[in-house]
Every structure is written in C-alpha cells, then in structure tokens.
Image: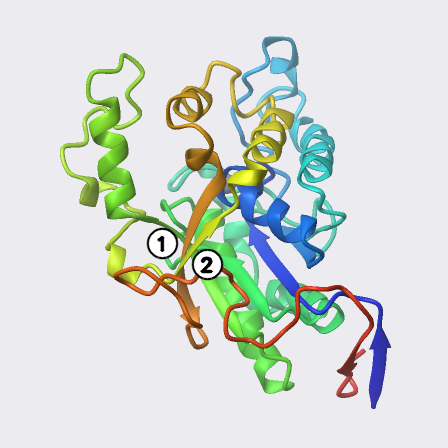
Amino acid sequence: MTVVTTLPDRRLLLVHAHPDDESIGTGSTMAHYAATGAHVTLVTCTLGEEGEIHVPELAGLAAAEADQLGGYRVAELAAACAELGVTDHRFLGGAGRYRDSGMMGLSTNQHPRAFWQADLDEAAGYLLATIREVRPQVVITYDENGFYGHPDHIQAHRVTMRAVELAAREGLAPAKVYWTAMPQSVLEAGMTHFEEASDNPFAGISDATELPFCTPDKEIAARIDATEQHAAKEAAMRAHATQIPATSWLYSIAGNFGAEFMGVEYFTLAVGTKGPGSGPYGWESDLFAGLGVGESPHLSSVSAAGHR
Ligand SMILES: [Zn+2]
C-alpha cells in the first residue's frame, strides 16, 4: 500500500528528556532544518517538573510547593518551538504521562510516573507510533550516558534506541541515528578562553576528557553549522526563563564566541552509514548527507506497510 503524504522529503525526529534540552542541545540544528523545508518533529519525554526555578516570582510553582512547574513549562516549550520554527511537537505518551525523575539518586527517581521507572516497551511503543506516522530518515537523541548522566536523558536514549529497533522490525528503520556530542577540541578551546573568567563554566576541570560528554574529534560524525540560526536558538533558550537565568554563562559565552558557540552543533553517528564529509575526520555538514533525499519540499510517497 502506498500513501501520499504532504510531509517534506527530509524528516528529522528529535527525542529530548525535558523542555529546554531541545533548545540548549540542538536548537540551531532544529531551526536550520525547519527553515530549509525539512519536517522537524520534537518528542519531549517529561514536563521537567523537578527543575530549579530561576524566576523568583514563580518560585511557588516548584515540585515541593504547588507542583505546577511542569504545566508552566509546557507553555515555555511552545514558545521555544515557535522561536525555532518547529510546529510538530509532542510529549511522549501525551503531556504528563511521564514525570521528571530529578537528578540521579534522589527519591523523585521512585515516583510512580517518573520516566526513570517507565516500562521500556510501553514508552518505546509511544515513540514507535510517531515513527510510523512521520517516517523520519534521521533521529537524534543522547548517548548511553544521556550526555551527562541525568536519569531522564539516559532513559530517553534507551527508549529511542528500543523504538528504532521495533521500527526496523516493521521495515521502518530510520536511515541514521545520531547522538549529541561535544568534540574535545571545541571544549579545549572553551577552557582556554574561560581560564581567567570569573564565571568560568569549566572551573575545577583540568582536562576536557573529565567532562562526560567530551568526545574525541575522530569520533564525531557531523558538524552542523547553523550559525545563521544562532539568534533563533538564543531566543528559544530565553523562552525557558524558569530554567536558564538571564545572567547565565551560556549567554556570556555566546557574546564572547559570537555566532559559532550557539550556531554550531555536533553529533556522533550511532546507526547508519556516514555520508560524504570534509576536514581531517570527514565530518558531515548535513545530517541527511548520503541519503539521496532532496532539499525542496514537495509531495512524496511512502509505503505504509500496513501500520498506519
Ligand atoms: Zn534535561
């Protein structure tokens, strides 16, 4: 059975743990692909109920107080997506199905709705339904350590990889799965730059390899230069005002490094074949490199394989 869809030729699915992770980690990439006509789908796994609150007048929303932060962050995420030009956003299993587990080891990990407690196949099943619908060629999530060890990020990794495995059994395997990463050379340049700064985000770190997300340059597969979208990414981050203080070093580093800090994002390739690239390590400049899908959005046909 062949179904004609109005989705663009290039379809990108991102799976993130909490509202704000999409903007901080992959905001420029999302904005870049949305602006160039790809279909960008964001799946967020929790509402981020356990986040700290950096807006004093909203402190009462905290989990230990009114426990209203999650609902508030739904609106922050919607505003961020609008800044990124992303119109297809979903919560895994629907808003509120899974709760923010909090940092590793906290009692919040044990909450009955905590994402850390999720049944893997049930959660992967929700994502599989989205994969069936959107048919992404490219999927982005975190590495097995969840980039930095937060339980919900680790779980997002597990759920995504399981959903990809289930999709493959139906003949719907995405061509590529990427994990977010930071090249060692980029971190080292940042450490040098901030050595003397009073707000040094690398304080206490003597070697970039101590950082859990530090990745040897030769293991990086793609460098997405979306510097043209750096302002959209910063605006999306500012939409998450409860999470990122206006005085954050993230914004000062942006001021120091210019568009590149906000606008360039890096990925390792976990599944699929690397396309043509350049530089000493053959980094791809396009996540769809080598897939033979066009740049221009038009009607495309996809086989439904009986799983609508
Ligand atoms: Zn997060």
Viewer-proximal residue among 99 and 148: 148
Q: Quadrant of the N terminus?
A: bottom right
Amino acid residing under circle 2? Ser
Q: Earlier in the sequence, mark 2 or mark 1?
A: 1
Name the colour scheme: rainbow
Q: In the rendered view, would you say 193 is above or below 105?
A: above
Q: Are marks 2 and 1 in contact (CB under 8 Å)?
A: no
Residue 67 sits in quarter = top right
Q: Residue at x 71, y 28 (%)?
A: 72
Residue at the (74%, 32%) spot, across then down: 75
Please, what secondary structure does the residue beneath circle 1 have? loop
Tell which tag, 2 or 1, sits nearer the viewer.
Answer: 2
Q: Nearer the viewer, residue 234 or 214?
A: 234
Quadrant of the snapshot with the C terminus: bottom right
Residue 167 occupies which quadrant of the picture? bottom right
Q: Residue at x 24, y 47 (%)?
A: 184
Q: Residues within 10 Å of mark 2 (few under 14, many from 20)?
A: some
Check the image and report above or below for 155 versus 49.
Answer: below
* Residue at horizontal 60 percent and vertical 33 percent from the top: 49
Query: Label 2: which residue?
Result: 285
Whether residue 17 is visible, yes or no, is: no
Which residue type does callout 1 highlight?
Answer: Asn
Give the secondary structure at mark 2. loop
Residue 305 percent across, percent down from the top left: 75, 87
Residue tagged 1: 145
Q: Position of residue 63 (x, y in %)?
A: 59, 27
On screen, 88 above or below 238?
below
| Residue 184 in sight here | yes
How far apart, in angstroms, are the residues tagged by discs 2 and 1? 25 Å
Can you give x and y, in whole percent of width and height, for residue 81 in the image? 69, 40
The image's mark for residue 251 is none
Q: Residues within 10 Å of mark 1 (few under 14, many from 20)?
A: some
